[in-house]
Image (spheres, rainbow, N blue to C red):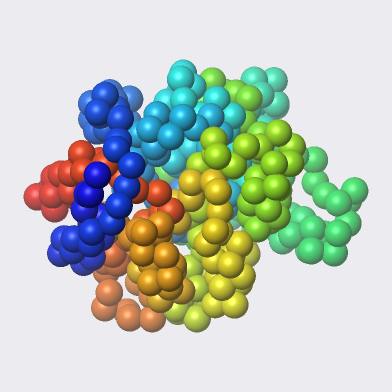
Amino acid sequence: MVIANIALCGGMDILEGLLAPPFNPNNHPISWNALNRGKIFSIISYTGGKHSLVPFLVPLIEWAGREYNLDTFITATGGACRVLTNLDPNRSIYQRRVFSDLDYSVACLFHVLRDEIQTKQLMRLLHGRSYTEYVFKAAQKARVADDALVRKGSFDELSDPIIAASNMYITAKMSYAANLKSFNWKLAVERRKRYYEEILELPKFNHILKGLQAFRMDCNELIHEVENRQNGYDPKRTLIYCDCPYVVEECLTKKHYSYSWSEQEHLCFRGGIENCQSRVIICGYQSPTYDYLIEKYPNRWHKVFLMSKHVSSANSKNLDAKFKDEYIYCNFPFSPEMHALIVAERMKRQKK
């Protein structure tokens, strides 16, 4: 069966022919609105987060799970984890869910929120701390200290996971534009009440994250484990989602993430995923580094334009740029119906 591989670039639909097996005619993609899950769940804001892309990514990932009979979903470069927290909460697909991030306190936050008792301990700790710059700076300092210990390999000296989780939550919630660096004085009074209300809402994530495997691990090592069938992974039944850090050289702010990637690190990552047996989705801006995959493996790797997304000017060298085009690179084909849903979602958002 010959279908079209639609690489939607900058709003233009470019059709590239490729051979693909027949798709399951009964596996119809379900739009975000039709999933009827209400408000998009978000635990913390995070630089480069994918809140606005959830209506594209969740329907696609769930369609792929049904189409390819997948049982494991991995978010290998964790961050705010918005995709995973908005997947089917009943786990009819992706029964095994994995979260990994190199940032210790980020990994601790999602580790703690899997468990009801630990979540209550976290809530008590957060409620006992005031919404002030002093508390923010103390949490920030503790995160820096933990990061230094991790880099030295001094794991026995790290903060308790619940304390580390609280430091992550505080710095994300109290900082300006979730930059984790500067206290947001401008909105401090306005946000204080909502901050404590959101702490009370944390238990709602227990059901969503129950059974989640959350840990600190380099994504390259994790992908290597999956591909080599270690720790019970089956690459043929796994989808790996990677929201990779921006290339440092392309950012105005060089300390964009605690763990940024150089161009060389992106090349290393690309080498590890280009022949993966697992299904892989890479989400980010268009990049020659990943365009290489399309050029080398035109019948395997595909690029799809999602939407132009508003970004902070601090993340781009072009200070006039307020929007950047978001793409996904993936190593599996979509059905024409799945492509059409992505286009429809984008058109709907362009009208707003």
Picture quadrant of residue 284: bottom left
* Left or right of 230 on screen, residue 236: left
Task: For the N terminus, give its image quadrant.
Answer: top left
Where 64 sits versus 303, above or below?
Answer: above
Instruction: Report x, y in % for residue 90.
Output: 46, 18
Instruction: Report x, y in % for residue 55.
Output: 30, 40
Instruction: Report x, y in % for residue 304.
Output: 29, 57
Where 153 sits versus 313, above or below?
Answer: above
**Residue at 30% over, 30% down:** 24
**Residue at 90% over, 48% down:** 156
In the image, 195 versus 209, the foreground residue is 209
**Residue at 50% over, 81% down:** 249
Tell me if I can see residue 235 in this picture: yes
Where 112 sits versus 155, above or below?
Answer: above
Picture quadrant of residue 308: bottom left
* Count of numbered circles on the image: 0
Picture quadrant of residue 258: bottom right
* Left or right of 185 on screen, residue 260: right
